[in-house]
Image: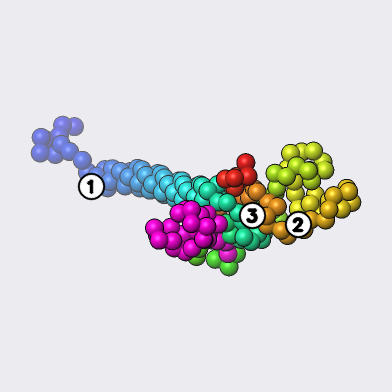
Amino acid sequence: MRYRSSEVGFTLVEVLVAMGVFSIVSLSFYGVLFASVRSTNASEDVVRVSEEARGGLNRMIRETREGQLFSSLAADSYNVRIDFDGDGVYENPNENGDYENLNFEYRESDRTIRLNNSLLVAGVTRIGSTPIFSYTSNDLRYDWNGDGVTTAAELDLAPARGYPEVSAGDTALYSNVEFAFQVQSGDRTTQFRSQAQLRNRR
């Protein structure tokens, strides 16, 4: 049977089948594309949150290393004093606009670490039972186990070892802050650990 030239082409059924196949392929392609975009956005969020947390941790380390003394120490907060202008007085702010009494605080209620009430790190939780801030001394007279670090428990043992009694709550005895926390973004968690030592106590 011979077809006339006017009858050459596709039937309606063939065109509909081709359109259906093209639609399925297109939907699959766009599904992969959108999944890839979502994955990229999630990765960018994790990186952004980690970078912000790292920036906040670096700020805590830098400011603590500038400090001359601790004025209060707790598991969720500490105060460090820095005499930027050298006048012997710790002011907030001093005549140059610098803050010399710095309060670092972990707020469990909103999962933040703050510096003088300003946000440093968001999305913060503890790593297990480890405190966000812990403190040690570089006064090795009280380092009974010889590991190079003097803890509050070792300070409390001074009388039993023949030394005058010292108070583990005496902030003047401490020189180091150890930081330990984790930050969550979506279903991913990044842990941060570091330490800082007062400027004149290294």
Crowding at dot 3, Cα within 10 Å, few <14 / some 14-19 / many 20+, comes out as: many
What number is the disc on residue 160? none
Residue receiving disc 2: 168
Residue receiving disc 1: 12
Q: Amino acid at mark 2?
A: Ala
Residue at 68% over, 51% down: 174
Crowding at dot 1, Cα within 10 Å, few <14 / some 14-19 / many 20+, comes out as: few
**Residue 108 placement: quadrant:** bottom right
Horizontal side of 37 relative to 84 (left or right) equals left
Q: Please state the horizontal and vertical placement of residue 119, each as a whole percent of the image.
A: 48, 60
- Which of marks 2 and 1 precedes in the sequence? 1
Residue receiving disc 3: 133
- Which of marks 1 and 3 precedes in the sequence? 1
Work out whether residue 192 or residue 135 is closer to the camera in this orientation and state it: 135
Q: Residue furthest bottom?
A: 109
Query: In the picture shown, does residue 31 fall above or below 100?
Result: above
Looking at the image, is mark 3 or mark 2 nearer the viewer?
2
Can residue 19 be seen in this snapshot? yes
Cβ atoms at labels 3 and 2 below 8 Å apart: no
